[in-house]
């Protein structure tokens, strides 16, 4: 399993003992407010999700990283790459996403973790394009996407949930051009193995 390090965070592989913290995040109504239909997830659903995240790494060679604060080792959520099969009209695609414990909001962790994951996707996995999907009212995620250099391409509705979402995207060429002019892009995403 690959490990990425940023100035403040470690993005690492999943462990079974992450389940309690993951389940707590998924049970928080404020965290889940803009995820699919806004429903919280129970422990069993979180356990199933954890196993799926582990399997995705084995199948694809990329996936969602567990994110922890380097200084304390505290698990704060996840960030990384996934296939957005919940939105068939964008397929084939790879999506960058994140979900953090509400106590970790407002510290820049989502941007820092996603910057490292974006770099990993483009430079280590050779992806040509990465998208991100957000509920149209999720302004926090919109700001992270903007900081990452993704641009809004179109709005649509998630089938089955009828949630209005905005699809943002960035290509590898756009990422490289941005990296050449924005030193934060490289600094925040420096990899440590």
Image (cartoon, rainbow, N blue to C red):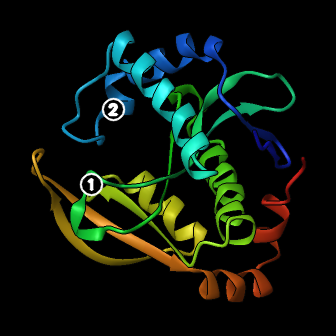
Q: In the image, 192: left or right of 141?
A: right
| Label 2: which secondary element | helix
In the image shown, does 49 or 108 lie closer to the viewer? 49
Query: Which residue corresponds to the image point at 39% horizontal and 31% vertical from the top-left?
Result: 31
Q: Nearer the viewer, residue 166 or 16?
A: 16
The quadrant in which residue 152 appears is bottom left
Q: Residues within 10 Å of mark 1 (few under 14, many from 20)?
A: few
Mark 1 or mark 2, earlier in chain: 2
Foreground residue, 136 or 77?
A: 77
Tell me: residue 31, above or below residue 176: above
Where residue 105 sits: x, y (%)?
56, 37
x and y percent of residue 12 in the render?
Answer: 73, 36
> Residue at image x 59%, y 68%?
148
- Residue 137 numbered tag: 1
Residue 104, image x and y in percent?
Answer: 60, 32
Q: How far apart are the alpha carbons under marks 1 and 2?
A: 13 Å
The answer to whether mark 1 and mark 2 are in CB contact below 8 A is no
Query: In the rendered view, does 170 fall on the left or right side of 110?
Result: left
Q: Residues within 10 Å of mark 2 (few under 14, many from 20)?
A: some
Element carrying mark 1:
loop
Q: Kindly indicate the quadrant of the structure image that contains residue 119.
A: bottom right
């Amino acid at each position: 399993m690959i490990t990425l390090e940023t100035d403040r965070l470690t993005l690492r592989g999943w462990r079974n003992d992450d389940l309690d913290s993951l389940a707590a995040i998924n049970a928080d109504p404020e965290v889940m407010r803009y995820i699919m239909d806004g429903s919280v997830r129970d422990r069993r659903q979180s356990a199933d999700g954890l196993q799926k995240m582990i399997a995705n790494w084995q199948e694809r060679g990329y996936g969602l990283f567990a994110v922890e604060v380097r200084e304390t080792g505290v698990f704060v959520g996840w960030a990384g790459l996934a296939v957005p099969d919940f939105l068939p009209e964008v397929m084939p695609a790879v999506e960058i996403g994140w979900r953090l414990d509400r106590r970790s909001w407002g510290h820049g962790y989502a941007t820092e973790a996603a910057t490292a994951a974006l770099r990993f996707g483009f430079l280590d996995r050779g992806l040509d394009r990465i998208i991100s999907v957000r509920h149209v009212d999720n302004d926090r995620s919109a700001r992270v996407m903007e900081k990452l250099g993704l641009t809004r391409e179109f709005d649509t509705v998630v089938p089955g949930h009828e949630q209005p979402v905005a699809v943002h995207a960035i290509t590898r060429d756009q990422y490289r051009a941005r990296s050449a002019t924005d030193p934060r892009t490289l600094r925040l995403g420096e990899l440590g193995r």
